[in-house]
Image (cartoon, helix red, strand yellow):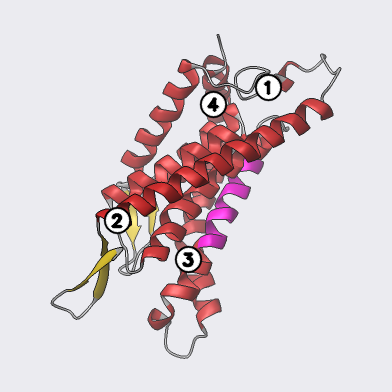
Amino acid sequence: MLYNVVVNDWDETTYVPTALGNALLAAVIVVLLVAAVTFARLHIRIQKQAHKGDKKDGSLVNAEGSRSGKMTIRQLVFCAMAVALGTVLSNIKLFHFPTGGSITLLSMLVACLPGYFFGLGAGLMTGLAYGVLQLVADPYVLYPMQLVMDYLLAFGALGLSGLFSNARNGLLKGYIVGVLGRYVFTVASGCIFFASYAWEGWNVLPYSMVYNGIYIFAEAGVSIVVLLLVPVKEAIGRIRRLALEG
């Protein structure tokens, strides 16, 4: 048995993982991490080939910390700090929906920073770690696979910001892609696991798209406005240079 079925006083059913279920979940996380690292190395190899011989633009230094793609202790510390700060900000809820989902204080933006700073591999691993902390700090689990989609895949997708770590306006582009990645997984989860919550007269797909779009894109919109502020861009640039030193 991978989970225990628990029915509360309101006849709502939740699923609590057993020891075996937690072990399986840990195995899934390991597999996802391995896949993330493998994909990141492939991405780095492609970047090296694309930028081979181009030494004019200093921003093309490998965002993984070195040409080998290995992360330094400094970079790991920055990733850990981003996970911790993002978790704190996620608990500052500007608005909270009763069946899950919140507009928080820029938590998604903070979770996207490691990808922009250090590249795709660091971004995906940071996103997964952030998702695990979200699961621990504020769980809303109805089904085992819903846990994987809502916490591991959706938050892990924020790491897609690393796809644009060397691009012009890379943080803005990466943040938009990361948010869209989270949105796709969250909408899919809503269609599969929360169909019974659809508003009267609504089909499940448009319901899930609108419901999840309200809080995800509301927070994203605020974050994008903040990112466009010149002092914020300059501050993030200084932090990135500091993170890439050494």
Q: Is tag 1's residue or tag 2's residue first in the polypeptide sequence?
A: 2
What segment carries the magenta color? 172-185
Between discs 4 and 1, the one toward the N terminus = 1
Q: Quadrant of the C terminus?
A: top right
List the single residue furthest toward the top.
246
Real-space Cα distance between discs 3 and 4? 28 Å
Which amino acid, mark 4? Answer: Ile
Return the residue at label 1: 62
| Dot 2: element | helix
> Which residue lies at the image location 39% right of the left edge and 83% below the top edge?
196
Percent from the top left, x then y, of residue 212? 47, 65
C-alpha distance separating marks 1 and 2: 40 Å
> Is-magenta flag for residue 227?
no
N-terminal of the two: label 3 or label 4? 3
Instruction: Mark yes or no: residue 230 visible.
Output: no
Q: Residues within 10 Å of mark 4 (few under 14, many from 20)?
A: some
Mark 3 Cα-neighbour bin, 10 Å: few <14, some 14–19, many ≥20: many
Answer few, some or many: residues within 10 Å of disc 2's Cα (few below 14, many 20 plus, some between 14 and 19): few
Q: For residue 20, which numbered disc appears in the image?
A: 2
How far apart marks 3 and 2 lie (CA) works out to: 31 Å
Instruction: Give the residue type at disc 3.
Output: Asn
Q: Residue at x 29, y 56 (%)?
A: 20
Q: Nearest the camera: 101 or 66?
A: 66
Q: Position of residue 5 (x, y in %)?
A: 23, 71
